[in-house]
Image (cartoon, rainbow, N blue to C red):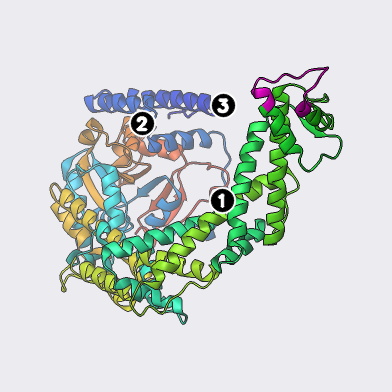
Amino acid sequence: MLDVGPASTDGPSSAGQRAEAADLAVFVDRLASAGSDDSTRTARTQVRRSIGEGNTPPGLRKLAEALAAAVGEPPSQRRPADEPRSVVAAMQSRNLVVLEDFGPADVGQAVAALVADGRRVLVTAATGPELATIRAALPAGAARRALDQLPSMPPAGLRELRRLVATSTPDRRARREQQLPPPARVPTVADVSALCEQVHRGVAPNSHGLVPGLLAELDPDRLAAVVSVARCVDRALGALRPREDRPWAWALLADLVYSRHRAVFERMLADTAQAAEALADAAPGPPVEIVAPLPGDAADILIRYVEYLEGGGRARAYFRSSIQREALPVLRRVRIDGRVPESLDDVYIVLRHLEIGERLARVELGCTEAGIPVPRTPEEFADLTDGLVKIAAGARMVGALKHDVLFLHPNSPLSVPDVGAAEQITAAILEYAERGSAPEAAARLDKLADELAMQASVQATAPEHAAAVAALRARDADAYEAAVDGIEAARRQLLDEQRRLALLDQLRADAPELAKAWERLEDAAAGLGMACFLPIDKLLDAVPPPDSADVVVVLGAARLGVERLLLAAAAPRLIGVVGPGERVNGAPTVVSVLQKAAALVIRGTAPAGRVVQLAPGARPGVPSPRANAG
């Protein structure tokens, strides 16, 4: 008997995996050392390569683990309630099973049951006649799923095909006869929702609801001009928002629309602009302070003094001129950076300061007349200056809108009596420019419905496609969104169906009967499995890639040497078959190793079958089940 199995590891996962791979490679070498034929050597080379690439065959790993776990363990208590009732049930919980005293008919029934359960079964034997006997014993449904070789289709494609066949429905198969519109030709939900909203909004119950109808009668150039003015109004009024930041600005704008305070406003606009410019020029200069009240004609006195100095006059300490004697008392009441001004440049600075003060006084007077707050800080003055400029722009744009609206139509009922009306009419014009009128939106929806309906013939139109067209004609945005979702789901179904047919055609190239059996719905009860009958030598010469099969059924297991356990590399589960009258002799065989690995045995001598445990012990916690043969 072989006494091998993977060693336990306590290190990191990667180190443990490397140690497990090394142990499994040793296990493969020991199995292969029991034989000397070419097939065994070829299989050993393939399996060692697969292990080295990190693709450990799960069947061999499970066999090695079972052998390692069974060493020195006491027998577990049998619990009949946990015993499976069939070979299929046994395969759902066990990886190693022995069918003892199973004749060809019993083996055929067991293979057919596994195929009906959707298993991919590899049936192998030492000779071709043994395989032919079992294949002849298969029921009709399983016989149509019997192959002489594995399909050339990659395992991933075969798995996808089985999924698509298993999930196929009459509705999905009906998609083959339908035509779905390309995604690019399906109007977006957002566009349709906007058009439906425009249609449902219709004509508003106020005068502004007349805007779309009036604009619809304009020629393109005139309409473009009106829309341009509306955009200007929107920008000008938007510059004054939010209202709560400058309530005085909106009040003054309303007065200007009614032509109130216009002269005061224009004077304030000029004064604030000039004062702001003068303040900007004076900002780099020294500070100026008035330390005593100045006479009312102080500016005139200083201007005459400047003209005197510019004309060649000199400032004298003695024998001063009358102009200098008149200017000196004024200059003594002023300080520039803490000193009394003396030079011509100093006099310029004082005059500029007096000019700024005069303009600020005029601005304060204008604010009082217009009823708006008087600025007390430089920040408030800057806000006033900026606000007046924006109010002027807003007033001009509202005036232009009033003119354009008045002449939209010879009998135009619209007017712009105030700022609020200007905002509403502006919004209505811009909305029309963006979305159009309700009749235009309805016409657009009808055009979209016609274009969408033309994407498929009447006979090939899918229900979801027809629902989308109907929703467009009904102006129902919610129904259209649901129909579009349905079209996308139908497109996925169509793609799945097309993929199913393409994979079936690919399978039909080398397994026509299997493809036909899987395609026929009436054979669905026979399952989506298959049975491939291959001699042992052929199977070992070319070990299938991972995920090619689910179960390997080895005929004549009591007559095969342990090197044939390399067949476990072909699938995750292994079934050894012992025919009637065959017994395990003293030499190590496939069955004797399975006995040591605590494989489940199903006896076929009684009608109901009887399950026993081959090994004297079993893994802790694993019941010793009893099952039917079929």
Label 2 amino acid? Ala
Secondary element at tag 1 = helix
Label 3 amino acid? Pro
Q: Classify residue 216 by image quadrant.
A: bottom left
Residue at (77% x, 26% y) in the render: 324
Camera-near label (1 vs 3) is 1
The range drawn in magenta is 308-324
Which quadrant of the rendered structure holds the C terminus?
bottom left
Which quadrant of the rendered structure holds the N terminus?
top left
On screen, residue 389 versus residue 115, left or right, reads right
Distance from Cα at disc 2 to Cα at disc 1: 109 Å
Q: Is residue 312 magenta?
A: yes
In this orientation, which residue lies closer to the viewer: 253 or 601?
A: 253
The residue singled out by tag 1 in the image is 389
Label 1 amino acid? Val
- Mark 1 or mark 3: whose residue is earlier in sequence: 3
Numbered tag placed on residue 12 in the rendering: 3
Camera-near label (3 vs 2) is 3
Does residue 486 lie above or below 121 as drawn? below
Distance from Cα at disc 3 to Cα at disc 2: 40 Å
Numbered tag placed on residue 375 in the rendering: none
Residue at (21% x, 67% y) in the render: 451
Residue 197 position, x and y percent, is 41, 72
Secondary element at tag 2 = loop
Distance from Cα at disc 1 to Cα at disc 3: 75 Å
Secondary element at tag 3 = loop
Residue 110 in view, yes or no? no
- Mark 3 or mark 2: whose residue is earlier in sequence: 3
Numbered tag placed on residue 587 in the rendering: 2
Residue 71 position, x and y percent, is 53, 33
